[in-house]
Image (spheres, coloured by chain):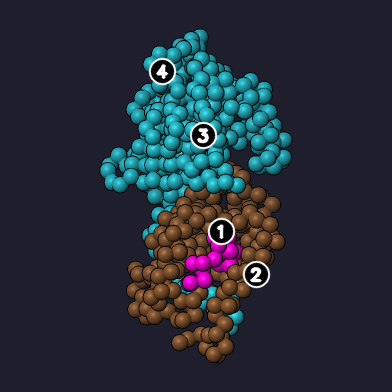
């Protein structure tokens, strides 16, 4: 028996992991902090900045709003694409007019939001649970971040430290390096799609859901300068197959107008304020309009350290 | 998260890790397949280094971190183990004091503190002399040497995989391993010469 064999027998025969702990760890991948990632939705960015301002720009309502009755199940034929373009352009105009927040690389983007998710590891229509979620993520991706979740129904707060060690930085959540014009943003999307998914995807004429996915990852719990955030919206306005629902209620109970895209049996929507076109939240629904996840952005702020209230 | 399971059942050969990860960029639930495949080994590794209860947390965190970084996974690599063990090892470093305290306690009193919650603790109460000495060596190795040695001995990772996991040159893996094995051998030498590792 050499020294390596002896070391192999050291602490060998560990008890298998507690199945409950394992199930919990697996579910956490899809649970509140992560579940909303399945929604290819534009997130927070603009939103919070927008909400933080009591009064912002009030882009004009579209000249000819399409008359569509409020409905849980979107009807693509009822909402012409032009309407979705108008909503997204108005959203771009709104966020583009918000003052830029000043962000240092060593700071954190703090986002507070309400999340409603179906309970359990599967999206099979389990009971819906409401969480208050707070996230503090490193602006330049080089510092450990923090995410906390608290159930509305009570119980302990769940805390997850997001580690970003030297040599393995996290994705920066403050992106000052992105294009500020629509064409530039579309090119940036396309390059990233090639990089992530391979050229076969980017050369397809309509890599639409991929662009939405990228936009969601980019903006969900991050902050973009207003001009770049506006470019994201105007770039998304060129995505094919978007539909509008004129009256929806977000996770915080606010009424808005949504723009969405359908794919793989789910529909992903961004919800905007009906008057200002400020970002309110996002939701993902399955067949029959069943809610898979529903989020409402409450606050966004730039802070110096994780855990610091915005 | 039925997708990866269904996917594995439906198709004959199971998809490689990089295929699952690539799929998970589009459908995040597919990442559950990576968890199912590797979490038992990751948890086992963590439990061996820092004990079960800490391992529960670090295992969950390992996969959360991996999930969050999956877009930057090198899709040319079919085996995600080096990547996952690298993340897990980094997380262990935050528990370094706990890990070392346990090794030292085991070396000193012959009882492994990480077994405290285990019903079999009675059966394993008296560590062998060899294991006490191993614990003493592990407590004295540099963090880098300990990482290399344990990934090799416990996880059977090859030199290249260890280099990838720890993001160090393969030559560094070799030199750390040589040094660590030498110290281990030296600590065990008299037991070995007696023909038995047991007192």
Residue A271 image-quadrant placement? top left
Q: Which residue is mark 2?
A: B178
Q: Nearer the viewer, mark 1 or mark 2?
A: 2
Q: Are marks 2 and 3 in contact (CB under 8 Å)?
A: no
Name the spot of residue A282 as percent of width and height, x first.
Answer: 45, 31
Q: Nearer the viewer, mark 3 or mark 4?
A: 3
Name the spot of residue A17 as percent of width and height, x first.
Answer: 43, 65
When the figure is inspected, residue A188 is found, relative to residue B34, above or below; the finding is above
Residues under labels 1 and 2: Cα distance? 21 Å
Residues under labels 2 and 3: Cα distance? 40 Å
Is residue B137 inside the magenta stretch?
yes
Residue at 33% x, 45% y is A157
Seen from the viewer's position, the closer of residues B163 and B119 is B163
The circle on residue A53 is 4
- Residue count near mark 1 (Cα–Cα under 10 Å), binned few <14, some 14–19, many ≥20: many
Q: Which residues are magenta?
A: B135-151
């Amino acid at each position: 028996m050499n020294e390596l064999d002896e070391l192999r027998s050291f602490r060998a025969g560990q008890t298998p992991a507690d199945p409950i702990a394992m199930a919990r760890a697996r579910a956490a991948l899809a649970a509140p902090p992560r579940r909303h990632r399945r929604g290819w939705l534009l997130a927070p960015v603009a939103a919070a900045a927008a909400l933080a301002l009591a009064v912002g720009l009030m882009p004009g309502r579209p000249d000819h709003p399409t008359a569509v009755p409020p409905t849980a199940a979107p009807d693509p034929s009822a909402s012409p694409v032009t309407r979705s373009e108008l909503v997204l352009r108005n959203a771009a105009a709104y966020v583009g007019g918000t003052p830029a927040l000043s962000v240092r690389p060593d700071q954190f983007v703090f986002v507070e939001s309400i999340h409603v998710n179906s309970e359990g590891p599967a999206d099979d229509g389990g009971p819906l649970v409401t969480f208050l979620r707070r996230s503090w993520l490193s602006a330049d991706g080089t510092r450990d971040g923090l995410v906390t979740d608290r159930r509305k129904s009570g119980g302990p707060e769940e805390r997850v430290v997001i580690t970003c060690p030297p040599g393995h930085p996290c994705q920066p959540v403050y992106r000052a390096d992105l294009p500020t014009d629509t064409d530039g943003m579309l090119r940036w999307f396309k390059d990233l799609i090639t990089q992530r998914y391979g050229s076969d995807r980017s050369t397809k004429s309509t890599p639409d859901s991929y662009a939405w996915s990228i936009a969601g990852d980019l903006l969900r719990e991050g902050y973009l300068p207003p001009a770049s955030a506006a470019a994201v919206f105007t770039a998304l306005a060129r995505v094919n197959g978007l539909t509008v629902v004129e009256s929806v209620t977000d996770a915080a109970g606010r009424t808005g107008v949504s723009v969405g895209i359908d794919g793989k049996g789910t529909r992903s929507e961004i919800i905007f304020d009906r008057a200002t076109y400020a970002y309110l939240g996002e939701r993902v629904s399955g067949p029959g309009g069943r809610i898979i996840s529903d989020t409402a952005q409450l606050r966004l702020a730039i802070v110096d350290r994780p855990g610091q209230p915005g | 998260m039925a997708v990866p399971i269904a996917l594995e059942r439906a198709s004959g050969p199971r998809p490689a890790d990089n295929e699952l990860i690539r799929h998970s960029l589009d459908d995040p639930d597919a990442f559950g397949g990576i968890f199912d495949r590797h979490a038992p080994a990751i948890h086992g590794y963590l439990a061996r280094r820092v004990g079960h209860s800490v391992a529960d947390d670090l295992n969950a965190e390992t996969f959360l971190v991996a999930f969050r970084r999956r877009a930057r996974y090198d899709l040319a690599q079919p085996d995600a183990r080096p990547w996952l063990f690298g993340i897990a090892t980094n997380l262990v470093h935050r528990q370094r004091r706990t890990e070392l305290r346990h090794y030292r306690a085991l070396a000193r009193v012959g009882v492994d503190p990480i077994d405290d919650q285990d019903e079999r603790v009675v059966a394993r109460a008296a560590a062998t002399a060899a294991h006490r000495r191993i614990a003493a060596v592990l407590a004295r190795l540099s963090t880098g040497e300990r990482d290399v040695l344990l990934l090799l001995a416990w996880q059977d990772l090859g030199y290249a995989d260890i280099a990838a996991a720890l993001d160090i040159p393969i030559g560094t893996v070799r030199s750390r391993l040589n040094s660590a094995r030498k110290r281990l051998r030296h600590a065990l030498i008299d037991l070995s010469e007696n023909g038995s590792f047991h007192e």
